[in-house]
Image (cartoon, grey):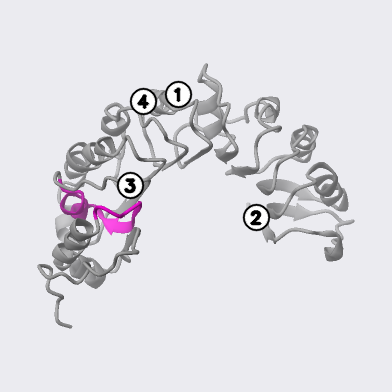
């Protein structure tokens, strides 16, 4: 295939384009192709810079990040930025990846986010676990400035500095409406609990109740304080015992529409509780270890737009 002319004006007529999504599989030939298409991507960003509201670097090898997020790239209307990169099988990626990763964070990702802090409303950063022991994001969260209108924040890392991440979340406590923390050394709930600041706008929370430092879950009662305002709650990771689920559902979840949770046991009573305690529920995802002998589901009783029950392998 002939490579498109990166210097042309192929994007100049795309006046209604407001979002760019870049994705690459981990296959080596796809990675090599993406290396060669850097000029095309950077040209698209340059020609559409004045109208882009969303930039999603969904799955790209981290060695491409510096080229895409160049110091000259400014998107004056950018509201959503998402980046999820991986360690490619290419030998250039594999050579001293930890040091190059730190350079990418310090020289590309951090400056780019800071340049757009006045317009950003949504920020998602996913770092793979295969950066060996050094996928810590201290250089990022320690150097990011306040994003004054940040409403949605999602982070996924194998390990990171809990104080730095906690400080970043606390900095935006008054504006955040949605928080998702996965794959972190600390649970999402602990990050909230350890902050002295409240989250008055919070309507969506996703993360784990457990972490490496606290093998036993944090009190369900702490999570219940968000019952009056949350419309979306995804409890990831380890399963809740039946008594903990009952305690959770004892709160007044009057606005909850989207609920995901893992439970050790499901019975007919479990579904009766869900229907009775969550009147606005539209989406339900249950991860189940085992089903009780009395387990029966009468599907006509459900009014969910999405209903998934999956067997959880212990």
Residue 60 colored magenta? Answer: yes
Crowd around label 2: few <14 · some 14–19 · many ≥20 (10 Å): some
Q: Please state which of the two labelled residues, at mark 1 or mark 2, is closer to the viewer.
A: 1
Q: Please state which of the two labelled residues, at mark 1 or mark 4, is closer to the viewer.
A: 1
Q: Tell me whether circle 1 and circle 2 mark residues in contact (CB < 8 Å).
A: no
In which quadrant is the N terminus drawn?
A: bottom left
Q: Nearer the N terminus, badge 3 or badge 1? A: 3
Q: Nearer the N terminus, badge 1 or badge 2? A: 1
Q: Is residue 172 left or right of residue 105?
A: right
Crowd around label 1: few <14 · some 14–19 · many ≥20 (10 Å): some
According to the picture, the residue beneath numbered tag 2 turns out to be 312
132 to 117, vertically: above or below? below
Number of marks in the rendered image: 4
In the image, 88 versus 140, the foreground residue is 140
Q: Tell me whether circle 1 and circle 4 mark residues in contact (CB < 8 Å).
A: no
Q: Please state which of the two labelled residues, at mark 3 or mark 4, is closer to the viewer.
A: 3
Q: Which mark is residue 78?
A: 3
Q: Secondary structure at mark 2?
A: loop
According to the picture, the residue beneath numbered tag 4 turns out to be 164
According to the picture, the residue beneath numbered tag 1 turns out to be 170
83 to 99, vertically: above or below? below
């Amino acid at each position: 295939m002939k490579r498109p002319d990166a210097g042309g004006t192929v994007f100049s007529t795309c006046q209604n384009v407001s979002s760019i999504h870049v994705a690459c599989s981990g296959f080596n030939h796809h990675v090599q192709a993406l290396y060669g298409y850097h000029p095309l991507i950077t040209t698209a960003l340059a020609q559409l810079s004045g109208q882009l509201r969303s930039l999603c670097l969904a799955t790209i090898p981290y060695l491409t990040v510096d080229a895409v997020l160049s110091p000259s790239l400014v998107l004056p209307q950018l509201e959503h930025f998402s980046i999820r990169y991986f360690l490619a099988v290419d030998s250039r990626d594999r050579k001293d990846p930890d040091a190059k990763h730190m350079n990418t964070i310090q020289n590309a990702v951090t400056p780019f986010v800071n340049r757009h802090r006045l317009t950003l409303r949504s920020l998602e950063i996913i770092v793979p676990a295969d950066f060996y022991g050094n996928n810590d994001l201290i250089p990022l969260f320690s150097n990011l400035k306040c994003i004054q209108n940040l409403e949605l924040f999602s982070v996924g890392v194998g390990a990171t500095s809990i104080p730095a991440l906690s400080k970043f979340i606390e900095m935006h406590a008054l504006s955040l409406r949605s928080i998702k923390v996965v794959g972190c050394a600390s649970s999402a709930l602990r990050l909230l609990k350890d902050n002295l600041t409240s989250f008055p706008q919070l309507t969506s929370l996703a993360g784990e109740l457990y972490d490496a430092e606290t093998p036993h879950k944090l009190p369900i009662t702490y999570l219940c304080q968000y019952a009056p305002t949350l419309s979306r709650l995804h409890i990831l990771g380890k399963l809740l015992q039946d008594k903990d689920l009952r305690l959770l559902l004892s709160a007044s979840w009057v606005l909850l529409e989207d609920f995901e949770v893992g439970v050790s046991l499901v019975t007919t009573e479990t579904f009766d509780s869900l229907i009775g305690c969550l009147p606005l529920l539209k989406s339900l995802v249950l991860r189940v270890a085992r089903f009780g002998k009395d387990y029966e589901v009468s599907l006509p009783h459900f009014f969910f737009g999405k209903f998934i029950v999956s067997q959880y392998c212990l």
